[in-house]
Image (cartoon, helix red, strand yellow):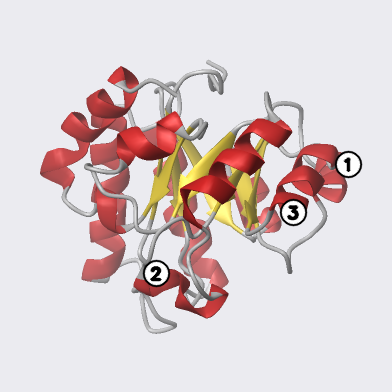
Amino acid sequence: MPLDLTTPITYLITDGRTTRETASSSAEFTRLFALVGACVLARVSLVQLREKQMRPRVLYELTRRAADLTRGSQTRLLVNDRVDIALAAGADGVHLTSRSLDPLVVRDIAPRGFLVGVSTHSLEEARDASARDADFAVFGPVFDTPSKESYGAPLGLERLREAAHAVAPFPLLALGGITRATIPQVMDAGARGVAAIRLFADESELDAIVNELKESRG
């Protein structure tokens, strides 16, 4: 079934703790595989495998197994940056950064329905993602978060509001320091959903967060 980008989107990003030493027999590999399974059960919209240090062969194996789990469910599987692995392993899409392939290039080589997400950090980048045929973009960091310190000060709710309304109806997801308490704020600012690492870190809370987001009003 196609992803409904008109309803609140939950976007879990894996924490990237794997290394070049991680193997398919490693505890970290097993943990990530189980996390994808938990996302399927909780009906999380999107899962991004953001394991930048994992060796390509191992990332392919993880993606292939995870794609088997998500196939036919309400959860879509994306791979960070590696279009080749996403396509070869049967993932639903790819998440691109400013250093990745152009979304239009991905469109030329990917099958119809392949999802393309893009990271953005300004109104200009959000507009560019929309113009270059991405399916959605994440925008942030909205609030303080350790994983996005290299991008400088948080952008804040007003910049999120400005960007979300400027590119509408193109889906913009809020990223960076989102908590359950601030979900209503980012949705009120016009975000189409929430992308996060720490917000979704506790598997036991996935169901509740998905339901809270669905009940929010953007």
Which x, y percent locates residue 51? Answer: 46, 67
Circle 1: residue type: Asp
* Outermost bottom residue: 21
Give the mark nearer the N terminus: 2 vs 3. 2
Q: Which mark is residue 136?
A: none
User: Is residue 90 depicted above or below 74 in this figure?
Assistant: below
- The residue shown at (27%, 51%) is 199
Which x, y percent locates residue 3? Answer: 54, 22
Query: Distance between the Cα atoms at labels 1 and 2?
Result: 29 Å
- Classed neighbour count for the residue bearing mark 1: other residues with Cα under 10 Å, few (<14), some (14–19), many (≥20): few
The answer to whether residue 218 shows anywhere in this view is yes
Q: Is residue 18 left or right of residue 71?
A: left
Residue denoted by label 2: 16
Residue denoted by label 3: 125
Residue denoted by label 1: 108
* Outermost front residue: 158
- Classed neighbour count for the residue bearing mark 3: other residues with Cα under 10 Å, few (<14), some (14–19), many (≥20): some
